[in-house]
Amino acid sequence: MDDLLVAYAGDAVERGRLRLADGWLRRWVGTWLVGRAEVSWPLAEMASVPVLSSQPVRRFTWRSRQGHRPGLQFMVSTGRHHGFESLEEQRLLLALDFVGVLEVLPQPFELDFEHQGGRSRHVPDFLAVMPDGRIWLFDVRPEWLVKPEDRLKFAAAREAAAACGWGYSVVAGWQEHVLTGLDHLSSQRRPLPDRLGLEGELLAAAPLRFGELVAATRLPALARAHATHLLWHRRLGVDLGRPLGDTSLVWSVRAGGV
C-alpha cells in the first residue's frame, strides 16, 4: 500500500496537544459494536477486541443534496460489499482489494480521547486485516480538506493504533497513474475460466511488453482479458507508477519479479 497511496503526516504537529501522561491507556476508550451491543474497552485492552466479530459503529446514510457520495463497493478479496461515504473512500477499498486484504470493517470503532482542551471523539474510516495478518487503521481525507480539528483526531488515532500494535495511515491521495491502472485492472478481477490455457502461455512468455505478450499467444484478443486478470491477481507484475498500455513491461511474479 505504501507504494500506491500518498500518506498525510501533518497530524504530527498536534501530538503535543494530546494527554499522554501516566494512565492514558486506561483513560482513552474505544467503543465497538459487537453483535447488537456497544462494548467499550480501555485502549490498554483494545488489541484483544474480536475485530472479525464486530460491526460498523455508524451506519451510512443517503439523502438528497448531501455533499458526499456514499455507496457500496464489492470486494473480491472478502466476497462482500463494503460501505463507503465518499469517492475517495471507494478508491481506498479498490486498492485494498488489489492487495488482497483478508477483511475490511468500515467505521470500526469510536475513539474517546483526551487532549489539552478536554475530550473528543473520532471514528476512523476503515480497519483492514492485511494479507500478512497485520491490522491497519485508515482515515481518508484529501490534504486540502484537512482541518485543524481533523489533525488532532488523526494524531489521536495514530497513537491509539500504535498502542494496539496496528499500522495507521491517513490517505490524502494516490501516486500518479495508480488509480487509472487499478480501475482498468479491476475490470477483470472476478473469476475468469481459462479453458483455452492462455494463462499458461502468458506466464511462460513474460517478460514482454503488454502488447507483445498477448500477441505471443494463440488468441491475442482473448489473451488480453486473461493478462489483465493475472495482473490484478499479481501473478503478472507491472509498474503502476507509469501509464498502463501496450508498451508497459509485464513480468511473471512467479519467476521472481516484484
Image (cartoon, grey):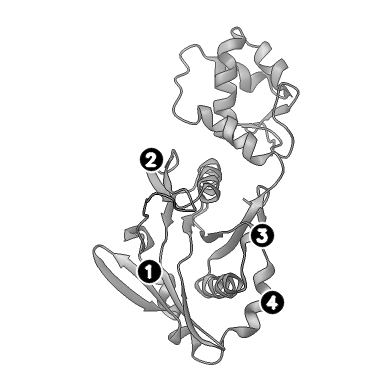
Residue type marked 1: Val
Q: How far apart are marks 4 and 3 (CA)?
A: 17 Å
Q: Earlier in the sequence, mark 4 or mark 3?
A: 4
**Residue 220: x %, y % from top left:** 62, 11
Q: Distance between the residues labelled 4 and 2?
A: 39 Å
Q: How busy is the neighbourhood of tag 2: few (under 14 within 10 Å), some, or many (20 plus)? A: few
**Residue 124: x %, y % from top left:** 48, 64
Classify residue 72 by image quadrant: top left
Q: Mark 3 points at which residue?
A: 144
Proximity of marks 3 and 1: CB atoms separated by less than 8 Å: no
Q: Name the residue under label 1.
A: 49
Number of numbered discs on residues: 4
Q: Earlier in the sequence, mark 1 or mark 2?
A: 1
Q: How far apart are marks 1 and 2 (CA)?
A: 23 Å
Q: Mark 4 points at which residue?
A: 13
Residue type marked 2: Gly
Callout in the foreground (3, 2):
3
**Residue 141: x %, y % from top left:** 58, 58
Q: Circle 2 sits in a helix, a strand or a loop, which is it? A: loop
Q: Circle 4 sits in a helix, a strand or a loop, which is it? A: helix
Q: Distance between the residues labelled 3 and 2?
A: 34 Å
Q: Circle 3 sits in a helix, a strand or a loop, which is it? A: helix
